[in-house]
Amino acid sequence: MADADALEVMKRGADEWNRWRGARRFGRVDLSGANLTERKLNGYSFLRADLRGANLTGAQLENAHLKEADLTGSGCRPGRFAPTRGHART
């Protein structure tokens, strides 16, 4: 189940989210089962995030950092997705 504090910080935008994640040394964050439908998540760092079962349908994920993120069972049909600069396209 998604961490309520994490979801609250997400609402403040990518800069605040990334500062919050950095302060926690980018440890694993639980966003499992979160409804992130149609969210603008451009530039968010989801490094090592647990996104299992999260609904990402229509989410904007341009330049989002998804390295080591667990997307198992997620509804990952993003509206816009582009890899972070410097990372290979897969």
Image (cartoon, rainbow, N blue to C red):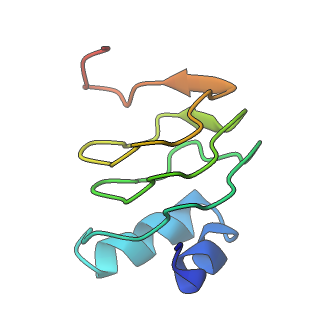
Query: Quick check: 66 above or below 48?
Result: above
Residue placed most toward the observer, 80 or 36: 36
Q: Residue at x 63, y 29 (%)?
A: 78
Residue 33 percent location from the top left of the image: 57, 61
Q: Nearer the viewer, residue 69 or 42?
A: 69
Quadrant containing the C terminus in the rendered view: top left
Q: In percent of the image, x 64 and y 24: which residue is there?
A: 80
Query: Residue 22 location in percent, x, y?
Result: 31, 72
| Percent x, y of residue 40 | 70, 45
Left or right: 54 with respect to 46?
A: right
In the displayed orientation, state which residue is furthest to the right: 38
- The quarter holding residue 8 reads bottom right
The residue depicted at 40 percent of the width and 54 percent of the height is 46
- Residue 61 in which image quadrant: top right
Residue 72 figure quarter: top left
Residue at horizontal 33 percent and vertical 48 percent from the top = 70
Q: Is residue 84 left or right of residue 36?
A: left
